[in-house]
Each structure stands twice: as C-alpha cells, then as structure tokens.
Image: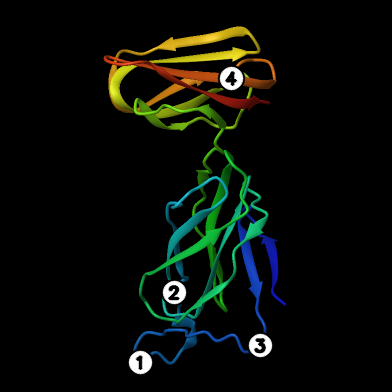
Amino acid sequence: MKRRAAVLAAGAATLSVLALPAGAGASVVCPPGTTNPIYCTQAPPVVTTGPAANITTTTANLTGTVNPKGLMTTWFFQFGPGLYYGSTTAQEGLVGDEMDHPVTAGLTGLKPNKTYHYRLVGYTALTIVYSTDLTFTTASAKARIIGSGGKVFKDVLVPSEVRRGARFRTCLTIVKRGRPIFTIRKGKKLISRVRLPPRRGRTCLSLKAPRSPGLDKLTINVKPNKGKSRHVTAIFRVT
C-alpha cells in the first residue's frame, strides 16, 4: 500500500514523502570515481502536461510527456471538475532511462459542456512530482432538430442545454448563398432575432439564452439568393 505524508518545515515549505513497498527499484547515479555517497544525487522525473485531444461530449484523451531521469517511474493523470481532481487514470510504468516518453490516457463517462481540470503525476522510489494544471471543456450535447435545411443548409449545431442569460454558440453550413435569420422564442413570445448578411459556408453565431428556465425554440431560416427559403427548429433547455 502506498502512503503519502506532508511535512511542514520551518519557513512553511511543504515536503511530500512517498513510501513504496519493498522491492521498488531505484537507480541512483553518482559522479564517476565517487566513493562518498554524500555526493550522489538523483534528479527527479520531469512530467509535462499536454493538451487534451479528441474531445467529445463524454470523452477526451489526456496527453503529456514523462522523462524518468534514470529512475523507474510510474505515471498517471489526476482529473476532475476542480483543483481537488477526485479521479485518476490507471497507473503505467516506464523504464529508468533519460528519454522523453509521450503518454496518453483516455477518459470516458464525462458530462457534456463541462470544464475539467487535469495534471500528470509521476513517482519513483525516491520522490513524487506533479505537472502544471490544465483544463478542457467537453462539447455540448446537440439539441433536437425539427425540419431540414434541404439543399440550402446543413450540419446545424445547437447545444441541448444552456444556462439562463448565458451566451451560447450555434453553427450551420450554408450550401446555397443566402441570408440566415436566427429567432429564439419562449412559447409564442419572441425573445430575440438576429439577421446576418448573405453568405455561404460554415457560419457560427453567439446568441444569448433567455433569462427564465424552461424549454425554448431556436428557429434558423435561410433565404437563398435564388429559390425558396428553408428552416429548422432546435429545441433546447434553459437551466
């Protein structure tokens, strides 16, 4: 069983002590010709947090780099909704060399549209080290879309849930050049309407959610330069 203890010395410096089971090997390096062990030193491993990748609504891959600095090193990620983390990935081992090793761990079961903190941890028989804290935010779940953009527009993206009064991002791809109109209604009440100049291609817009909770509708209408307009309605929840 691993045991960690924090010792507070004079000057308010914190020392982390890690006790490992018997048999955990360590390779201590001394200068050539040294006979007095007082001159033997061992640099701690170097762990560096990398960016999160392949982020979806419920999954993400954490990345980083570990250099064992000559000692057998075990690494893992801590992650969670705050700086207290609360969860860890599986522990993996590295040989005691002096090389930078790219490491990665996959996360599942995350919540949509939520920010997570994470950092990389490495420990040896002599020490434990932590990388800097980074964050990532999972993608928003998609709202239910009613209707079709036909040959006028496609790939509509609206979050299924937003906070009241907060801004949220909606996107669509306009196939036929036209003028997009975004209308938010709560029941029959008009909340907001935004008209953009004619355009084609991927278009994203920041909209403001209603201030009262409940189910709301966002209607996206695109009037092409030629032909009939098309529209879809996204049902989203304000919390």
Residue 9 image-quadrant placement: bottom right
Q: Earlier in the sequence, mark 3 or mark 2?
A: 3
Q: Secondary structure at mark 2?
A: loop
Q: Amino acid at mark 3?
A: Ala
**Mark 1 = which residue?**
33
Residue 96 in the figure: left or right of residue 129: left
Image location of residue 8, percent across then percent down: 68, 58
Give the class, few, some or many, for how many residues have Cα within 10 Å of label 1's Cα (few <14, many ≥20): few
Q: Is residue 95 left or right of residue 234?
A: left
Between discs 1 and 4, the one toward the N terminus: 1
Q: Residue at x 60, y 26 (%)?
A: 235
User: Is residue 131 found left or right of 85 in the rendered image?
Assistant: left
Q: Amino acid at mark 2?
A: Pro
In this rendering, the answer to whether 160 lies above or below 217 is below
Q: What is the number of the mark on residue 22?
A: 3
Residue at numbered disc 4: 217
Mark earlier in primary sequence (4, 2): 2
Nearer mark to the viewer, of 1 and 4: 4
Q: Is residue 208 visible?
A: no
Q: Nearer the viewer, residue 168 or 193?
A: 193
Q: Please state which of the two labelled residues, at mark 1 or mark 3, is closer to the viewer.
A: 3
Amino acid tagged 4 = Lys
For the point 59% across and 85% down, the residue is: 24
Seen in the picture, residue 237 relative to 60 is either above or below; the reply is above
User: Which residue was labeled with disc 2?
Assistant: 68
Between the C-alphas of marks 1 and 3, the distance is: 29 Å
Disc 2/disc 1 C-alpha distance (Å): 24 Å
Foreground disc of the pair 4, 2: 4
